[in-house]
Image (cartoon, helix red, strand yellow):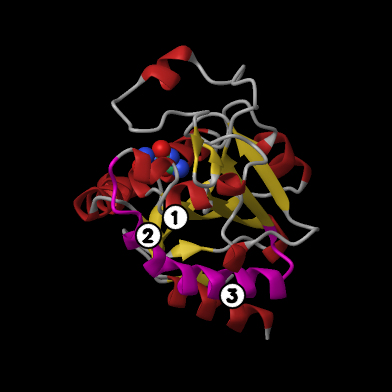
Amino acid sequence: MPSIPALPYSYDLPASPSQIALIIIDMQRDFMEPGGFGDALGNDVMRLQAIVPTLKRLLDTARAMNLLIVHTTESHQPDLSDCPVAKLKRGHAKLKIGDPGPMGRILVLGEPGNAIIPELAAKPNEVVLAKPGKGAFYHTPLEQILQEHDITHLLITGVTTEVCVQTTMREANDRGYECLLVEDCTESYFPEFKQATLEMVRAQGGIVGWTAPAESIIAALTDWND
Ligand code: TIU
């Protein structure tokens, strides 16, 4: 059975590639481009762009191997009925969830800003889940979909590392999934928070899971396929 060089120790792959899913968290314009939610919160959104080519390479590998691919977006219904008042009120953003911005209403399903960036747009056979929370399991069918596909291993990517990515990884870990956070396919508005997240998930013998760079994962998956 192949394994991937990872931290805190090597990550054993399952018996079949069909048990692995690639999870891509919230690579949507709201977080990646000026004028969206990330920008409204006062962040330098352009620093997230650096991971896009690497994540695209990993996505291409996953597609070539027919892995289950799950894209998420952080999204609310147009009437905001799925947005808790606490979330709506939180902070001092110049634009709040549901307000009209340059890419349409902030964080609202179907608006231009809510779309996944074109480089990583989902193919018709891939799963796209709109999630109202930070974690991808909360109020979504993700667990059921993973069970239906007999998934045991998750390659976790996307933005932002310490918010939606880490929340999702912790939710997945508690549900028994073997989680590998892809170091150069996740990014934060705060480099120190990204680094801290990588370190905390793999501390204590991998308390939340493993981390590895994309090239190690692509190499292992490609060798396996040969
Ligand atoms: N603000 C921030 O860093 N992240 C979010 O609000 N959502 C996600 O991480 N997707």
Callout 3: SS: helix
Callout 2: SS: helix
Mark 1, residues whose alpha carbon is within 10 Å: few (<14), some, or many (≥20)? Answer: many
Q: Nearer the viewer, mark 2 or mark 3?
A: 2
Q: Give how far across and how far down residue 13 sits, in percent.
A: 56, 63
Residue at 28% over, 26% down:
92
Instruction: Check whether the beta carbons of the residues at disc 2 and disc 3 lie within 8 A of each other.
Output: no
Report, in whole angstroms, how far the alpha carbon at label 3 lies from the one at label 1. 28 Å
Q: Of the numbered discs in the image, which one, if any, rests on residue 130?
A: none
Report, in whole angstroms, how far the alpha carbon at label 2 lies from the one at label 1. 6 Å
Q: Amino acid at mark 1?
A: Met
Sequence-earlier tag: 2 or 3 = 2
Instruction: Say which of 192 and 18 sits in front.
Output: 192
Mark 2, residues whose alpha carbon is within 10 Å: few (<14), some, or many (≥20)? Answer: many
Instruction: Check whether the beta carbons of the residues at disc 2 and disc 1 lie within 8 A of each other.
Output: yes
Magenta segment includes 152? no
Callout 1: SS: helix
Instruction: Say which of 160 and 184 sits in front.
Output: 160
Q: Nearer the viewer, mark 3 or mark 1?
A: 1
The verdict on label 2 being within 8 Å of ligand 1 is: no
Q: Which residue is mark 3?
A: 221
Sequence-earlier tag: 3 or 1 = 1
Mark 3, residues whose alpha carbon is within 10 Å: few (<14), some, or many (≥20)? Answer: many
Q: Amino acid at mark 2?
A: Leu
Q: Which residue is mark 2?
A: 48
Q: Of the numbered discs in the image, which one, if any, rests on residue 32?
A: 1
Q: Give how far across and how far down residue 163 sits, in percent.
A: 38, 40
Q: Which residues are magenta?
A: 42-68
Residue 33 visible in the displayed image: yes
Residue at 45% over, 77% down:
215
Residue at 57% over, 53% down:
23
